Amino acid sequence: MDILKASTDWAKAEVFSTTFFIIAGVLFLAAGIGFWRLGQTDLAKAYIIPMLVAGALLLIIGFGLFFTNISRISSFEKAYQSDAPAFIQSEIKRVDDTLQEYKTVVFTAIPFIIIAFALILFFVNTPIWRAISMTAIAMLIVILLIDGTAHARIADYKKQLVLVEKQE
C-alpha cells in the first residue's frame, strides 16, 4: 500500500470537502443580502445580521481548512521522503487528535448547541431570537453534514496508516 498516495488522496478529498463550507458561506451571505434587500417583515429583517455572521463564519472555516489542507499536500511528500516511519507516527497522532476533536466538538457539543437553539426557538418569540436560532441551527447542520463525511474519511485514513505501520 502506498501510504503517501493515501495521505495525498485524503488531503485532496479534504480540500474538495472544504469547498462546501465556502459554498454554504456564500449562500448564507447571499441569503443575508436577500433579506436586507427584500425583507419586508420584522422577522425577515431580523435574519440579516445572523445570516451574514453565519456566512462569514462558514467562509472563515472553509478557507482556513482549504489552505491548511493545500499546504499539507505538499508537506506530505517532504515528510515521507525524509523519514517514512516518523511520518506515519506523526500522522497517526494527528489523526487520533482530530478524531477526538470530532467526538468532543462535532458529535457532542454541536448537537447540544442545536438543542439549546431549538429550545430558544420554542420558548422565545421575538423576531431576532427566532432568526438567530434558525440561522444557528442551519449553520450547525451544515457543519455536521460536512464534518460527518470528513470524520468517515479520516477514520478510514487512520485504518490505512495503522495497516502500513504494522507492515513496517
Image: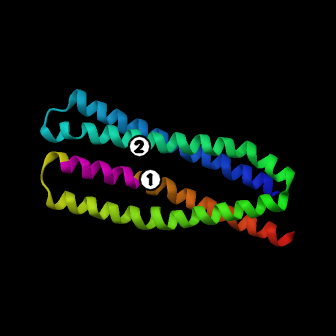
Write the start and end of the magenta stretch as one range.
129-141
Quarter in which the N terminus is drawn: bottom right
Q: Nearer the viewer, residue 79 or 8?
A: 79
Q: Residue at x 24, y 40 (%)?
A: 47
Q: Amino acid at mark 1?
A: Ile
Question: Does residue 49 sit above or below 111 in this rendering?
Answer: above
> Disc 2 or disc 1, which is closer to the eye?
2
The reply to whether dot 2 and dot 1 touch (C-beta < 8 Å) is: no
Q: Secondary structure at mark 2?
A: helix
Q: Residue at x 32, y 36 (%)?
A: 31
| Mark 1 neighbour class, 10 Å CA radius: few under 14, some 14 to 19, many 20 or more | some
Quarter in which the C terminus is drawn: bottom right
Identify the disc placed on residue 143: 1
Examine the residues drawn in magenta and state their main secondary structure. Answer: helix
Q: Is residue 117 left or right of residue 85?
A: left
Question: Does residue 39 sit above or below 24 in this rendering?
Answer: above
Q: Is residue 48 visible?
A: yes
Q: Residue at x 37, y 64 (%)?
A: 111
Identify the disc placed on residue 133: none
Q: Is residue 95 left or right of residue 129?
A: right
Work out whether mark 2 precedes mark 1 in sequence or the reverse, and give the earlier one. 2
Q: Amino acid at mark 2?
A: Leu
Residue at numbered disc 2: 57
| Mark 2 neighbour class, 10 Å CA radius: few under 14, some 14 to 19, many 20 or more | some
Q: Secondary structure at mark 1?
A: helix
